[in-house]
């Protein structure tokens, strides 16, 4: 009788241990919200920083620390291009420094330090970019900058600016801004916002060399084939800079394509945008018939925008003439219908005689009018005004000949002194092949008499 009692005791003991393990393990492993309240939906907030923003600490040692009110996501590195900044370091910018920056995660805090150590007499900017998240994926939406110094008082000068992609005719968001106080080469760093604007507050007065870089490989440095621009700005109390980023080529443009448009016009495409500040000259283009090399006179050169404008005007004139012909035809039809109605008393009025609907009358919407769209308009007046300060680059030109080109003919096209946006010129050439029009075939089946 003792054995069943002992067995029952052991079973109860095992059940108790299992229950304790389940409860204890769940409490240790769970990262969920504690009972008694709704889950947090706000982004992590900064509780304190070491040093504090505005502090002067000549003997700064160790790490700069940013403490949050919540455990933040570690954002482990997941590889990428060589030299690319990844992980939590993507959200941290420390400048000016002349070496790499160490960024480490400590649950609810971020530790930052330059590998070269803290230099005396510098004004440091520690910027936290948007996107720092807690474990519930609540992330910050704005950036925060902590300014502290190792000697001088915190300055009050400010540098602001806008970055434009010259070739694409738009602003450049997330461009890397590097501003070095001359003659030093160590730069302050920040990024442009979604509108292509940047702001560097609390920087020392003086002359700055400013770079704007389209950072495609995320290393915050200028690399080959990345669009960039640079200007020199004198910052007193405040200064503004406008930068036009483009790819700086060291070789001149090459002819990439030569495409026919019609019997008189063809389009030449280049490997890089041409400098729009240099006027097009027909003397720079030669056309030679192959294989005998007899020349073909060039009548005009057009930029894509100019040629499209000419084509649009021609289509508008053609559409106007067509509408005039249609209106005349309708008037003739209406006149004949009235004569037929007069000859037949009591006949109902034909549809052509009924009063047409008036465009814009109540209850009707005019195509293309204000009532056709409900989308809110974005005010881009400032961007348009900035872009108007420089002409629009183009990587194609339309060549118009003085005489029609022969169908099926081949022509050698030479362009002398084509100049890219960097001011580098080169001679280029390509071959134009004029297509042979397809013969028009008539369907004669309808003209055949039907069998009896």
Image: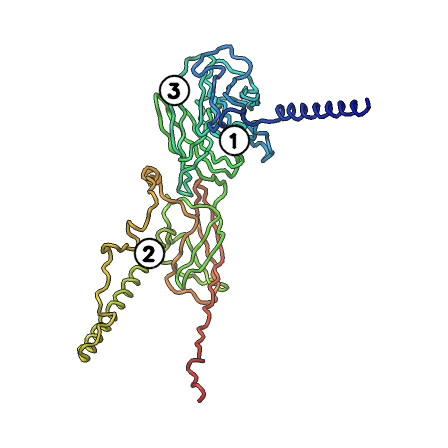
Instruction: Point out the image quarter for the N terminus.
Output: top right
* Crowd class of label 3 (few under 14; some 14 to 19; many from 20; radius 10 Å): some
What residue is at 29 percent from the left and 50 percent from the top? 371
Query: Residue at 43% across / 37% down in the picture?
Result: 172
**Is disc 1 surrounded by few (<14), some (14 to 19) or many (20+) residues within 10 Å?**
some
Report the residue at 51% width, 15% height from top. Answer: 119
Q: Earlier in the sequence, mark 1 or mark 2?
A: 1
Q: Nearer the viewer, residue 126 or 409?
A: 126
Q: Residue furthest front?
A: 1
Element class at badge 2:
helix
Numbered badge on residue 310: 2
Q: Height in image: 128 above or below 450?
A: above
Crowd band around label 2 with a 10 angstrom C-alpha radius: few (<14), some (14–19), many (20+)? few
Q: Percent from the top left, x then y, of residue 247?
A: 47, 40
Q: Are marks 1 and 2 in contact (CB under 8 Å)?
A: no
* Residue labelled with disc 1: 137
- Would you name the residue on which mark 3 appears? 205
In this rendering, the label closer to the viewer, 3 or 1: 1
CA gap between label 3 and label 1 equals 40 Å
């Amino acid at each position: 009788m003792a054995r069943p009692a002992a067995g029952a005791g052991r079973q109860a003991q095992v059940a108790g241990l299992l229950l304790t393990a389940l409860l204890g393990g769940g409490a240790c492993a769970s990262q969920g919200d504690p009972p008694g309240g709704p889950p947090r939906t706000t982004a992590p907030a900064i509780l304190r920083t070491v040093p504090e923003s505005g502090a002067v600490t000549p003997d700064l040692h160790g790490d700069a620390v940013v403490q949050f009110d919540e455990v933040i996501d570690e954002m482990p590195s997941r590889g990428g291009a060589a030299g690319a900044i990844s992980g939590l370091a993507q959200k941290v910018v420390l400048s000016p420094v002349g070496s790499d920056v160490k960024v480490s995660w400590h649950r609810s805090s971020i530790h930052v330090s330059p590998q070269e150590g803290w230099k005396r007499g510098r004004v440091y900017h520690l910027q936290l970019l948007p996107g720092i998240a807690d474990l519930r994926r609540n992330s910050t939406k704005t950036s925060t900058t902590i300014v502290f110094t190792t000697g001088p008082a915190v300055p009050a000068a400010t540098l602001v600016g806008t970055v434009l992609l010259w070739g694409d005719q738009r602003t450049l968001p997330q461009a890397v801004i590097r501003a070095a106080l001359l003659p030093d080469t160590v730069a302050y760093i920040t990024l442009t916002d979604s509108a292509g604007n940047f702001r560097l507050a609390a920087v020392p007065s003086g002359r700055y060399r400013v770079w704007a870089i389209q950072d495609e490989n995320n290393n915050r440095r200028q690399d080959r084939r990345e669009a960039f621009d640079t200007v020199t700005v004198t910052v007193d109390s405040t200064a503004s800079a406008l930068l036009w980023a483009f790819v700086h080529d060291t070789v001149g443009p090459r002819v990439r394509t030569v495409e026919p448009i019609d019997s008189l016009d063809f389009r030449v495409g280049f490997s890089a945008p041409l400098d729009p500040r240099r006027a097009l000259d027909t003397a720079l283009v030669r056309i030679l018939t192959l294989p005998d090399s007899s020349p073909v006179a060039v009548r005009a050169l057009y930029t894509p925008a100019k040629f499209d404008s000419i084509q649009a005007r021609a289509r508008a004139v053609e559409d106007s003439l067509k509408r005039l012909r249609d209106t005349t035809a309708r008037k003739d039809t209406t006149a004949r219908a009235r004569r037929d109605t007069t000859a037949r008393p009591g006949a109902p009025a034909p549809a052509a005689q009924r009063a047409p609907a008036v465009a814009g009358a109540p209850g009707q919407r005019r195509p293309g009018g204000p009532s056709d769209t409900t989308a809110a308009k974005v005010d881009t007046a400032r961007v348009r005004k900035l872009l108007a300060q420089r002409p629009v680059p183009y990587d194609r030109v339309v060549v118009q000949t003085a005489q029609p080109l022969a169908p099926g003919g081949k022509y050698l096209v030479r362009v002398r002194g084509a100049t890219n946006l960097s001011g580098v010129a080169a001679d280029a050439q390509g071959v134009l092949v004029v297509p042979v029009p397809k013969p028009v075939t008539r369907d004669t089946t309808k003209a055949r008499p039907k069998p009896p």
